[in-house]
């Protein structure tokens, strides 16, 4: 009897030891459903399937199906003069040889770009640099149709051009309404990079209102990391509903390829250029005939200002709208239509956004005191094509 009791005690001890080890090292063995052991683990670490499906669609094919047919390939040709033999480095000798009859020969250069059909009447938006200097422009649709394009008008200040093609039943891409694009929105870039054919890339809106890049006179770019490469210029930047939010225009690159920094002209600005070119043949912009200069801390101290704010008027055109409105050299523009302004780019953009003939109120600082001037805008001279 005592022996049986000892065996029973030893068996119980061994079982308790095994249970302790298992509980310590592998507690999930004791649960038939691991999530039942930690009921809050899944809800704490993983989003619900329903929420994930709502926030991140598995495909953007519906948006592409809406937009892609309206994005066209643009083929341009132009005649260029090239020398038959390498020119010498000396500028005098180069000029001499260039004037020798028969030394140069004419060749045809071709290039590729993209465009967007934005009207059933055959209006196509693209970049000016895509078609600049071209002797022939051919627009190719995704359905295989092609047409020679006519240039309706260009806007060098925004690097946009409006073409016209004479085709029926054209696919049209709608502009996004009121420019609701936000940083972080998913966007798709559609174009013809490197001439390989229509290509779709995806990214997000990285920033809004990018300027100071030295690309255009008026810069208010959408920055995106959707891959944009040579040949994408003039193509569409669309949202996930297939609406046009921008015209792909430029990239920042040290290699010639995409580095994740691309720029697009906002659809609202492109639509205004389209409307004005179709109506007038050019874009009407407000103009004061002034030469502005950014304020610096040193200049602020020289003018007796507590901080570097506002824009200095460094030059005023004689008999221009600004001079007639009372602006003088040395005035500091601090507000425009009641809104503060602190750099030349925004000042000129705000003036240009107004229609010629409209009144504009400027808040200026002159001779130690602030005052308001009201002036009538003129029309900005149009750059020659």
Image (cartoon, rainbow, N blue to C red):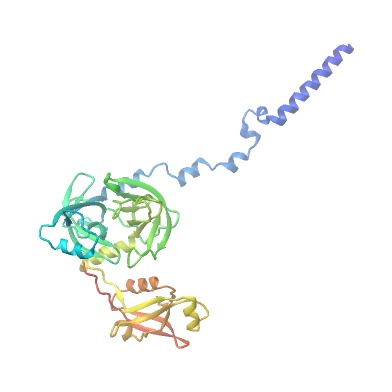
Q: Position of residue 331 (x, y in %)?
A: 41, 83
Q: Position of residue 214 (x, y in %)?
A: 35, 65
Eyeballing the image, is 113 above or below 377? above
Of the 4 image quadrants, the one containing the C terminus is bottom left
Eyeballing the image, is 179 above or below 351? above
Count of numbered labels shown in the rendering: 0
Q: Which residue is at 28% across, 45% downward?
A: 198
Q: Nearer the viewer, residue 315 or 65?
A: 315
Q: Which residue is at 21% across, 44% downward?
A: 143
Q: Position of residue 108 (x, y in %)?
A: 16, 53
Q: Quadrant of residue 274?
A: bottom left
Q: Nearer the viewer, residue 229 or 35?
A: 229
Eyeballing the image, is 255 above or below 279? above
Residue farthest right in this picture: 2
Q: Quadrant of residue 61?
A: top left
| Visible residue check, residue 127 | no
Q: Which residue is at 24% across, 70% downward?
A: 383
Q: Position of residue 85 (x, y in %)?
A: 18, 53
| Visible residue check, residue 34 | yes
Drawn side of residue 185 relative to residue 66, left or right: right
Residue farthest left in this picture: 101
Of the 4 image quadrants, the one containing the N terminus is top right
Drawn side of residue 347 relative to residue 118, left or right: right
């Amino acid at each position: 009897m005592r022996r049986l009791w000892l065996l029973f005690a030893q068996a119980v001890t061994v079982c308790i030891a095994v249970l302790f080890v298992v509980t310590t090292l592998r507690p999930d063995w004791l649960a038939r459903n691991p999530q039942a052991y930690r009921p809050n683990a899944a809800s704490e670490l993983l989003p619900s399937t329903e929420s994930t499906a709502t926030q991140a669609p598995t495909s953007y094919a519906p948006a592409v199906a809406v937009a892609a047919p309206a994005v066209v390939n643009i083929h341009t040709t132009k005649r260029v003069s090239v020398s038959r033999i390498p020119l010498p480095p000396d500028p005098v000798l180069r000029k001499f040889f260039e004037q020798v009859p028969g030394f140069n020969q004419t060749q045809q250069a071709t290039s590729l770009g993209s465009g967007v059909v934005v009207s059933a009447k055959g209006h196509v938006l693209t970049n000016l640099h895509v078609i600049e200097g071209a002797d022939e422009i051919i627009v190719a649709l995704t359905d295989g149709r092609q047409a020679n394009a006519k240039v309706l008008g260009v806007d060098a200040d925004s690097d946009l051009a409006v073409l016209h093609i004479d085709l029926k039943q054209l696919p049209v891409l709608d502009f996004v309404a009121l420019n609701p694009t936000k940083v972080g929105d998913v966007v798709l870039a559609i174009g013809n990079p490197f001439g390989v054919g229509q290509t779709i890339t995806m990214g997000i809106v990285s920033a809004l209102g990018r300027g100071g890049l030295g690309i255009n006179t008026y810069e208010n770019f959408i920055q995106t990391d959707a891959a944009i490469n040579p040949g994408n210029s003039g193509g569409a930047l669309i949202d996930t509903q297939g609406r046009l939010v921008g015209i792909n225009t430029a990239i920042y690159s040290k290699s010639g390829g995409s580095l994740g920094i691309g720029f697009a002209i906002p659809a609202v600005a492109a639509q205004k250029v389209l409307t004005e070119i179709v109506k007038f043949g050019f874009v009407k912009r407000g103009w004061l005939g002034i030469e502005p200069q950014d304020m610096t801390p040193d200049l602020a101290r020289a003018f007796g200002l507590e901080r570097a704010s506002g824009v200095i008027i460094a030059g005023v055109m004689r008999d221009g709208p600004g001079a007639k409105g009372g602006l003088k050299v040395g005035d500091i523009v601090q507000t425009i239509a009641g809104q503060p302004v602190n750099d030349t780019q925004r000042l000129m953009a705000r003036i240009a956004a107004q229609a010629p003939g409209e009144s504009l109120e400027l808040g200026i600082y002159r001779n130690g005191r602030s005052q308001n001037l009201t002036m009538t805008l003129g029309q900005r001279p149009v750059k020659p094509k």
